[in-house]
Image: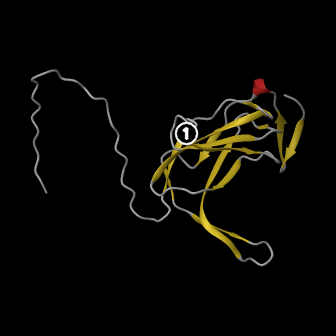
Amino acid sequence: MSGEVKDGGVVRVDCTAASTSAPVLLSPADGAVVTETVSTLASVTREVLRTGFAVDFDWESPSGCLLPYGYRVDVARSASFAPSTLMQSWRVTNPPTQYWSLWDEWHDCERYFWRVSPLLDYDVVGPASETRSFVVNTTGAFCPPELERGPIIDLGPGVDIPLSGHGA
């Protein structure tokens, strides 16, 4: 660690790569349903420039480090963050904040996954946070629960499974 820096009255320490740990995610919470619609206003006329749906991401550095290169925020449609499911990776820098608001073409009732990594240098990514998910509900309508598919178990030939129940 090196010199101390005042950040809004809070003393923070510049950190080396060895002392930097994964960020701690604050919001949205894992499994949260995000429903807020927001408007962007012109600074002088207060005219509404656009109204839409934005998701606010919040995190903190457990080591109290002030990272000069900021953070990378990944949002994807899969917890694997495979390139085909990655919406984008954003660099949050200048000044290195721990907050990001994302306007995008969110799909109603779809689950998204997010994580944050510190940038230790311009092109050096540090350890990623845990992965969290959230569901976007842009209309306020009912979102059906997701079905989880368990493993398929082969019981062998000739095995009968009795089923019971009643119709509606």
> How far across and down, in percent of the image, does residue 10 sit?
82, 46
> Quadrant of the rendered structure where residue 163 is?
top left
Does residue 13 sit above or below 144 in this rendering?
Answer: above
Q: Is residue 26 left or right of residue 163?
A: right
Q: In this view, does 151 lie to the left or right of 63?
A: left
Query: How many numbered circles does the render carry?
Result: 1
Q: In which quarter of the image is the N terminus?
A: top right
> How far across and down, in percent of the image, does residue 142 sit?
38, 61
Does residue 92 sit above or below 1 in this rendering?
Answer: below
Q: Residue at x 65, y 48 (%)?
A: 58
Q: In which quarter of the image is the C terminus?
A: bottom left
Does residue 139 sit above or below 1 in this rendering?
Answer: below
Residue hosting label 1:
84
> Quadrant of the rendered structure where residue 161 is?
top left
Kindly state the secondary structure of the residue where label 1 is placed: loop
Q: In this view, does 66 lie to the left or right of 81?
A: right
Residue at the extreme right of the image, as rendered: 3
Relative to the observer, which residue lies in front, 154 or 84? 84
Q: Residue at x 58, y 35 (%)?
A: 130
Q: In this view, does 129 lie to the left or right of 70?
A: left
Judging from the image, the colouring scheme is: secondary structure
Relative to the observer, which residue lies in front, 17 or 7? 17
Q: Which residue is drawn at 71% across and 38% down?
A: 61
